[in-house]
Image (cartoon, rainbow, N blue to C red):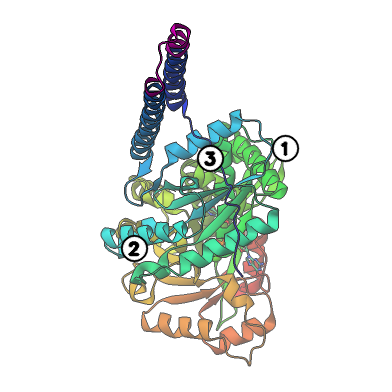
Amino acid sequence: MKLKINKKTTIHTNHTAQLIMTILSLSLVGYFVILHIDIFSQFRNLNILTNRLRLLTIVIFIALVLGQTYMVLLIISKNKEIEKLAFCDKATNLYNKAYFIRLLEEEFKSNKNDKKAIILINCGTIELMKQFFEGKMVDQLLLEKANALKKLNIDERNLFRYSEDSFLVYITGYHNEDSLRKIGDKILALLDNTTHKMDCDAFIARRLGILEMGENYKNVDDIIKHLEITINKIQDLESDKHWFFSDEIQKEILFDKLVEKELRKAAHVGFDEEFYLEYQPLVESKSNKIIGLEALARWNNKELGMVQPHKFIEIAERTQLIIPFGEWVIFKALEFLKQLESVGLNHIYLAINISAIQLLQDDFIDYLANAVERKMIEPQKIELEITESKFMYNYEENNRKLDLLRGLGITIALDDFGTGYSSLARLRNLNIDVLKVDRIFIENIINPYEEDVFVKSIIILANQLNLKVVAEGVETEEQKQYLLSENCHVMQGYLFSRPISAEKAISLIKKNNPRAS
Ligand code: C2E
Ligand code: CA
Ligand code: CA
């Protein structure tokens, strides 16, 4: 289907300078017209004007008007060239962010009611790609993508390189939401079908956030923020899609703001007031015994009630509050390990979730080592879980830190395995001891007699690499039996126990393994 984009798409640029020049030039032309008419009528009054002279005067008059018009056009075109230089992204030859902001500011001032929308195209993995491929190659890829966008058949001044890894398309005069969706599809198709295919092409993300600019928008920052949130929404779901900014997302933004405010308050008064840890058993497959517990943070806020960990962890990471919060989690978790020891549960290890942001702090290892030493805890009882996708962004640095942590005797688990970017080749070089297979792959095991290639091959690979495999999110007996038959080492999930309080965890372990207490 051929897509039609309204070619009347307009752009309102600030032509104040051209306007002044035009007025000046037209006044000059006007002055000449009056002057000529004046001379003309005086000659007529004197009755001395011959036909030839009259013709000459007219020719001079026309020449003057044409000369003036040419000058005005020349000035306007020079101005445009200068403008393009100032507002152009050199790498892609598209207009830049500054020009986009100027365009929107002009739009806010004009009170036109035609439909306007902005599409943000996020190629999100550029930073990651530069770790794998030569910078030049990645730049070339971006140029290819920019050229592909030019095929959109849209006024060039409505295409922008917005940031290192994002483009913007400004659309006006479209019909309805469906037309925007079609434009979104067309963009995705164009990005996929670039002329030169490159090795790194497969790694580039293609996510579109679409925002219709209603009356409410009076500020560029809000628009960009809302588009970015929309794009993050796609990131959570799947890649290669477009998503509309909606009321639902608007509500989420407001909720996020409240969470952030309350989180800042909590950090100020101390996390002890409203936060606590729950513990979820880790069960050894072959013995069916609890061998460890994973500490999971919980937040019961006065205003918001129970807040989902995914939500507050994400906001804590964005605001860097994860650093003091993470220290609090470690402190509480180590206290619990002491409590386990005090009731005779010496064989239980504790898995603690840490964020890649914590790991990147210069003093993280010192903090942990000191805390472990002060509390006189055997480091072997601590397993740190780090999420695969976040870890990969600073691969070299993170991997070096993991080596140091393992040197202290701490075990390292790669959490949510299968959802990130680690290639199998890279897995060999990772300083980890455990692979924690993401819940999504366990969910797929519905029928134990049907082969699940992913889980099966992960277990084979892990055995080759001497890694322990933990399956999380085990909910059914069928899943358990399948994992047992494939020799998965450890399981965790609602089938065994939900996350529970410290006291309940202690009594569950005692019941599960009476010999140990
Ligand atoms: P995660 O580390 O992957 O934790 C496992 C999540 O799956 C937990 O959700 C747990 O309650 C849930 N779960 C466990 N078994 C099952 C099951 O059988 N079925 C289903 N449907 N779900 C199951 P929770 O507690 O909501 O935590 C969500 C995420 O928040 C965690 O995912 C982790 O990434 C993060 N998180 C929690 N506590 C902390 C923390 O102290 N520090 C950091 N950095 N992240 C944390
Ligand atoms: Ca975890
Ligand atoms: Ca996980």
x, y (%) of residue 79?
37, 32
Which quadrant does the N terminus fall into?
Answer: bottom right
CA distance for labels 1 and 2: 41 Å
Q: Amino acid at mark 2?
A: Arg
Q: Secondary structure at mark 3?
A: loop
Evaluate if marks 1 and 2 touch, with contact meaning CB atoms under 8 Å apart. Answer: no
Q: Amino acid at mark 1?
A: Glu
Q: Is residue 124 left or right of residue 296?
A: left
CA distance for labels 3 and 2: 58 Å
Q: Secondary structure at mark 1?
A: loop
Q: Which mark is residue 406?
A: 2
Residue located 36% across and 79% down the image = 465
Depth check: give the residue in front, 423 or 499.
Answer: 423
Magenta span includes 52:
yes
Whether 150 is drawn above or below 509: the answer is above
Looking at mark 2, is its residue's CB closer than 8 Å to ligand 2?
no
Q: Which residue is mark 3?
A: 11
User: In this view of the protein, can residue 267 be seen by the observer?
Assistant: no
Magenta span includes 271:
no
Number of the front mark, 3 or 2:
3
The magenta span reads 38-53
Number of the front mark, 1 or 2:
1
Depth check: give the residue in front, 149 or 349.
Answer: 149
CA distance for labels 1 and 3: 46 Å
Number of the front mark, 1 or 3:
3
x, y (%) of residue 433?
39, 70
Q: Which residue is mark 1?
A: 303
Of the numbered discs 1 and 2, the one sitting upstream in the chain is 1
x, y (%) of residue 486?
53, 88
